[in-house]
Amino acid sequence: MEKSKKQPSSQEHKPVGRPRLTNELLDVNLQVRVTKKLADTCKSLGGANFMRPLLEAATQRAMALKKLAPARPGEDSEGIKFIDLTVQCGFPSPAADYAENDLSLNDYFVKNRDATFIIEARGDSMIDAGIYEGDILIIDRSVEPRRGDIVLAYLQGDFTLKKLEFVDGKPELHPQNSSGNYPVIHPGEYDDFSIEGVLVGSGRRYRN
């Protein structure tokens, strides 16, 4: 969930930004049909020099999103026996009557299978929200993200899980860790940023 931080080196001074393309690499023409208005706009903004970084960024994002395969639980998956009995986390309850039926975890957690996928949590930036390393997170792309939701965001080539807030109409991604080790993320106007889904469920294994 956290981005790796590179330690600056006092002995190296590497160029900032994308490496400059050499003529040896530009040996393939890519033709795309677009409207005249779009073509004129691209030409006015620099033509091929304007389009190359956009295509590069779009390709990187497409490859990253391709890894988010939707969850498609088997249609024939069996349900787990569900006992209609609330559980006391303090003193035990003397109630003994209960009803039984089947509970499908797929149906319970996944409301829209075509828009739902599962990821595994990494890091500790969301532990105050009860999300720990190794937890299974269920993300639904069809749910409209709202203030206070925990969302999977895509920012500049990386994915991160954070709480969504809005300040002056602008989105902010807030970690949920009181240690103060993780800053609030403020996506810029020109950043490659999007909300890829909302956290709708989670799971944790306590023993094998």
Image: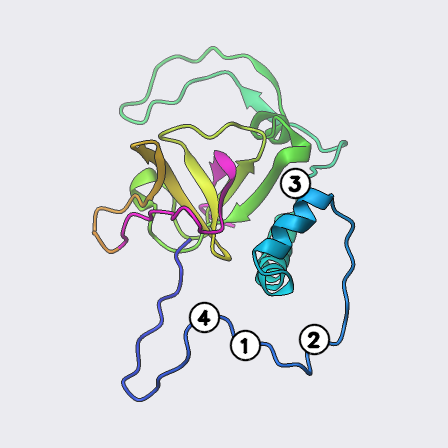
Q: For the residue marked with disc 4, what is the amino acid?
A: Gly
Element at label 4: loop
Occupied quadrant, residue 47:
bottom right
Depth check, mark 2 against mark 4: the one in front is 2
Which circle's residue, 2 or 1, is located before the other in the chain? 1
User: How many numbered circles are shown?
Assistant: 4
**Residue indicated by mark 1:** 20
**Residue indicated by mark 4:** 17
Q: For the residue marked with disc 1, what is the amino acid?
A: Arg
- In front here: 75 or 113? 113
**Residue indicated by mark 2:** 26
Magenta segment range? 182-208
Alpha carbon separation for disc pair 4 and 3: 36 Å
Is residue 189 on the magenta stretch?
Answer: yes
**Is residue 107 positioned above or below 206 on the image?**
above
x and y percentages locating residue 83 in the rendered image = 53, 20
**Residue indicated by mark 3:** 71
Element at label 2: loop
Alpha carbon separation for disc pair 2 and 4: 19 Å
CB atoms of marks 2 and 3 within 8 Å? no
